[in-house]
Image (cartoon, rainbow, N blue to C red):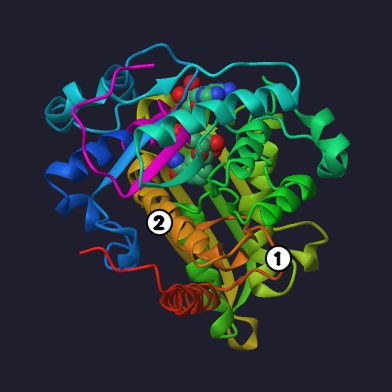
Amino acid sequence: MTPNAPSRTSSLLLMIAGAKGAIGSTLAVAAEVLHENPAPILSSMTTAHQFPWLGPPEKICVAGWDLSHESMARSAEVQGVLPPHILSACADRLAFLPVIHPPALPDLESQTARLMEDIAVFRDAHPGAAPVLVNLLPSGRQPDPEDCKGVEGLRRAYHPDTCPDLAYGLAAVRSGVPVVNFTPNIIETDAIVEEAVAHGVPLSGRDGKTGQTYFKVVLASALKARSLFVDGWYSLNILGNADGRNLMDPDRARGKLSNKTQLLDDILGYPVGERYGVSAHKVHIDYYPPRGDAKEAWDVIDFEGMFGMPMSLRLNLQGRDSILAAPMVLDLARWMATLKLAGRSGLVPELGFFYKKPMGDHPPIAFQDQLQALAALGRACETAIGHQPDVKETP
Ligand SMILES: NC(=O)c1ccc[n+]([C@@H]2O[C@H](COP(=O)([O-])OP(=O)(O)OC[C@H]3O[C@@H](n4cnc5c(N)ncnc54)[C@H](O)[C@@H]3O)[C@@H](O)[C@H]2O)c1
């Protein structure tokens, strides 16, 4: 492991699986910049003024795992997410971030035990910081959820190449560390959720709702609220980062496409395209290298008003995948640390605002319900933490 940088006090420890990827390296840079010049990052977070019990939101440190042997500074440069002047300002400190090349043991229990040792080392290096594991591994070919049932199913489903996520999730839960599953991959099997409850650990996921799907939820909720009938919705994405390349594999893309598709019918309360006998909600993702992380998405929405008169709406998003994702991960990590402090364990469907496929029972579906659920969750945490005599606000 890399030697420690001159010490800094941190309130939150992000342990990232996939720390040198596009989002992971952006987070590493953001965590460094936060210590020196927090304004541009805090202003893009939604929790910067919440959760005083976690201490200053700018005191965040990063550790993690990645298969890449590149340095963190070089990884961030290659991802092409951030301009050189931002990278050069923190390149020296990035070299000190402890990022471990993970083991790839063939059985789940041994792999989990090794990752738990790493987690203990990361935590020892940052005493007092609230730990959260963030899953940012590439989207993988997923096992059938039915095959992951029970402890035996979980062990059989695990493979170090195709489902490494399961071992990271289990290691975190057994270490008492909350989990953010930002990927479309399965972590929330019944056995892992049971262990989370037994260890008093909250677990949230799945699949961060960063760009096109975020606006889809907003627009679909608005159309539904006005009784405007959606006849069809065509969504196209181009992106040129490693995630986009990965999603060219139909097996790897299946989970992501299903997460991007299902929620529309759920919000509207009817299957779009029912009258045609086929779904008229189409979602395509194309790998287009020239764009790198700067993804572009188009939506064509056909809808009807009174007398069935047809109308249509075009949306063109020119986004930046990791710039949208990184502050959401920071917010989610702060939510998870707060939920742990509030005594919450197991799945947290109330965080549906952040996810394409919120896991847990009865997640809020429409945008306004997601905002309300989030506000109610914040109030519940405040009450629970306020009743704990030993939790004090950190100045
Ligand atoms: N960017 C977004 O807007 C967005 C939105 C929703 C979900 N996601 C999901 O977030 C995840 C991360 O996205 P990204 O763009 O950073 O991906 P990425 O491919 O750039 O990064 C993944 C990293 O994981 C590393 N890795 C692979 N296997 C590993 C293992 N076994 N252990 C440790 N590290 C390993 C890779 O070397 C790579 O550095 C993906 O699953 C993506 O689908 C991204």
Mark 1: secondary structure: loop
**Within 8 Å of ligand 1, the CB of disc 1?**
no
Residue at image coords 21%, 33% = 7
Q: Which disc number belongs to residue 272?
A: 1
The N terminus: image quadrant: top left
Amino acid type of the residue that numbered disc 2 sits on in the rendered structure: Arg
**Magenta stretch contains residue 11:** yes
249 or 45, which is in the foreground?
45
Quadrant assignment, res 172: top right
Query: Can residue 246 be seen in the rendering of this structure?
Result: no
Label 1: few (<14), some (14–19) or many (≥20) C-alpha neighbours in 10 Å:
many
Work out whether 72 lies above or below 361.
Answer: above
User: Which residue is label 2 attached to?
Assistant: 334
Going 50% across and 67% down the picture, which residue do you hit? Answer: 342
Query: In this rendering, is residue 73 above or below 388?
Result: above
Q: Which stretch appears magenta? A: 1-26
Identify whether 346 is placed above or below 192. below
Residue 129 horizontal/vertical position (percent): 36, 46
Residue 175 x, y percent position in the rendering: 58, 41
Residue at position x 70%, y 39% in the image: 254
Q: Is residue 195 left or right of residue 175?
A: right
Question: In the displayed structure, does residue 275 sit left or right of residue 298?
Answer: right
Which circle marks residue 164 in the picture? none
Query: If you read the primary sequence from the N terminus, does the residue marked by circle 2 or circle 1 appear first?
Result: 1
Q: Residues within 10 Å of mark 2 (few under 14, many from 20)?
A: many
Q: Is residue 357 magenta?
A: no
Q: Quadrant of residue 170?
A: top right
Q: Residue at x 69, y 29 (%)?
A: 163
Across and down, in percent, residue 57 comes to 27, 55
In front here: 131 or 46?
A: 131
Secondary structure of the residue carrying numbered label 2: helix
